[in-house]
Amino acid sequence: MTLKLTPVCGPIYEAAAWAPAGDTWVALTGSASDDDVVRFVAEVARYGRVLDCSSLDAAIVSIAACQHSLVVGGGLRVSQGALRIDPSCCAGLEGWREWLTAACDKHSPWMGHDPSPWVAFESSHVVIHTDETNQHSACAPPIMASYDELETALAEAKADLAGFYLKLGALASKMPRSVGAAFLSVLQSSFFAHT
């Protein structure tokens, strides 16, 4: 079975009143719906305590005015067949880049806590455990993949993020040019830059 690393934002429990309802997780891919793009922006504004998130336009303007990097819950969802490991509490989308050097460094990227998923780097493969404190649980089997599969999954995750960023660009194009450009710049540096 193929290893998949899907960039996600969430879990979203308190959506903005103007944001469309949806699943607690937003998959950040080029095939995301317009509603999912709006839900991502709403969650970035809410999570980052942006000054004004009373409407979509206000959230975009406030994000554009940010002078610091933003954070939002999420990261890379790991899946293989029916097995799925979502980012846990305190994991952030901004931390997805830790995966880019994890195999070389042999250091697990931060995937959250309660449960505490983590990655073990064996000589020929990686093992992604669902919970560091319960590694041998029969109800939570680990996901195993070769280093080549991990590299391929990371390349696909980068492509997914690039596709989602294009969706954000379409949203930004509806704003005044300087606001749209600043909005994209803040999001690029916070979540979408690859290095």
Image (cartoon, grey):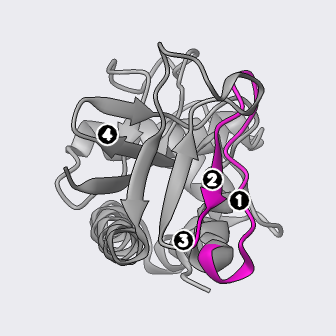
* Secondary structure of residue under mark 1: loop
| For discs 1 and 4, the disc positioned in front in the rendered view | 1
- Report, in whole angstroms, how far the alpha carbon at label 1 lies from the one at label 2: 5 Å
Q: Amino acid at mark 1?
A: Ser
Vertical side of 60 occupied by 182: above or below: below
* Pair 4/2: label in front: 2
Residue 42 among those drawn in magenta: no
Magenta stretch: give its range.
103-123
Q: How crowded is the residue under tag 2: few (<14 C-alpha within 10 Å), some, or many (20+)?
A: many
Q: CA distance from mark 4 to mark 2?
A: 29 Å
- Identify the mark at residue 36; answer none if there is no mark: 4
Q: Amino acid at mark 3?
A: Val
Residue type, numbered disc 4: Asp
- Mark-to-mark CA distance, 3 and 4: 21 Å
Pick the residue in front: 16 or 96: 96
- The circle drawn on residue 108 is 1
In the rendered structure, does residue 114 fall within the stretch colored magenta? Answer: yes
Which residue: 33% across, 60% down? 171
Task: Tell me the number on the disc at residue 119.
Answer: 2
